[in-house]
Image (tube, rainbow, N blue to C red):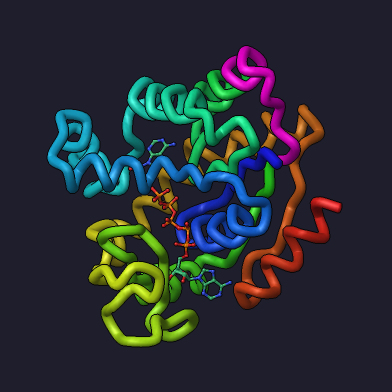
């Protein structure tokens, strides 16, 4: 299964990608997670990316395209992938098309998840993420068994720097300006399926599964 999860900040792409990656036994590839790891490791790429991420802006296309090129070339991606947060601009989508054609790894579908702004802001302000394995929780909607501790690996949970309300609003604006044009791009390819994102995690997941049958 090769899927792209498309949607604005906080619609649940990461949450659904984790569930789908487990179900299909394929890697979950999230450019946001890879960039945050690079920031944590203090690499040159991480330092460059941080200045964009903290402001809610997109990291330049050449950086994220390079990340995806390297990641899709790894052996575990041959069986399938769930792409979360990539592509986010038309040049990124064009680069992905070229790459998947070259690797003979055609996409099965682009899943577009749509949720209302108020719901998204509530979700993002309560989000907690594991510092070690990046598993995502919500203090109210999907809490860990022990507050502040990851169920999966025991790592510490933290609140993302870009989950402050003003940065959330900026990310939504950037999404509308730079990522929404991808809907038309993928509608032309006939691979897009649209799924409502306002329901519970289980309801959204059921919607995705239905749309893929
Ligand atoms: P990225 O990490 O991709 O952030 P995003 O797209 O803004 O998406 P989020 O991770 O905020 O939300 P999500 O949809 O994954 O929601 P989640 O499942 O966590 O990117 C961050 C930054 O990196 C960007 O701003 C940019 O700077 C850079 N970047 C990344 N990719 C890039 C690219 N391709 N090009 C350029 N720059 C790039 O859910 C949110 C919360 O809600 C969680 O707490 C979760 O538990 C909860 N939740 C989820 N679903 C539900 C539900 N149905 N009901 C109740 N709660 C729910």
**Quarter-wise, where is residue 38 in the image?**
top left
- Where residue 89 sits in the image (x, y, percent)? 50, 31
Q: How many numbered circles does the render carry? A: 0
Residue at 74% over, 52% down: 194
Please say whether residue 102 is one of the residues in the magenta stretch.
Answer: yes
Front-most of 42 and 62?
Answer: 42
In the image: residue 207, left or right of residue 123: right
In the image: residue 158, left or right of residue 21: left
Front-most of 2 and 26?
Answer: 26
Q: Quadrant of the N terminus?
A: top right
Looking at the rendering, the quadrant in which ligand 1 lies is bottom left
Asked if 149 appears above or below 191 in the picture, the reply is: below
Residue at 38% over, 51% down: 171
Please say whether residue 156 is one of the residues in the magenta stretch.
Answer: no
Magenta highlight range: 98-109
Residue at 52% over, 29% down: 75
Asked if 5 appears above or below 66 in the picture, the reply is: below
Front-most of 94 and 183?
Answer: 94
In the image: residue 141, left or right of residue 1: left
**Quarter-wise, where is residue 109 in the image?**
top right
- Where residue 127 sits in the image (x, y, percent)? 37, 71
- Where residue 86 sits in the image (x, y, percent)? 50, 37
Residue at 30% over, 63% down: 163
Asked if 213 appears above or below 46 in the picture, the reply is: below
């Amino acid at each position: 299964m090769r899927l792209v999860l498309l949607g604005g900040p906080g619609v649940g792409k990461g949450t659904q990608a984790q569930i789908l990656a487990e179900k299909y036994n394929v890697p979950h590839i999230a450019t946001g997670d890879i960039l945050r790891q690079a920031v944590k490791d203090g690499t040159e790429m991480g330092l460059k990316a941080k200045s964009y991420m903290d402001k809610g802006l997109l990291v330049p296309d050449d950086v994220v395209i390079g990340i995806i090129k390297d990641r899709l070339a790894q052996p575990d991606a041959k069986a399938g992938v769930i792409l979360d947060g990539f592509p986010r601009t038309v040049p990124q989508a064009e680069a992905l098309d070229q790459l998947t054609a070259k690797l003979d790894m055609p996409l099965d579908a682009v899943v577009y998840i749509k949720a209302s702004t108020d719901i998204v802001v509530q979700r993002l302000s309560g989000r907690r993420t594991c510092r070690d394995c990046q598993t995502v929780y919500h203090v109210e909607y999907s809490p860990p068994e022990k507050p502040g501790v990851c169920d999966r690996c025991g790592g510490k949970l933290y609140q993302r720097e870009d989950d402050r309300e003003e940065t959330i609003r900026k990310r939504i604006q950037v999404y509308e300006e730079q990522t929404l044009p991808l809907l038309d791009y993928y509608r032309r390819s006939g691979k897009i399926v649209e799924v409502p994102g306002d329901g519970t995690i289980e309801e959204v997941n059921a919607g995705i599964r239905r749309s893929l049958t």
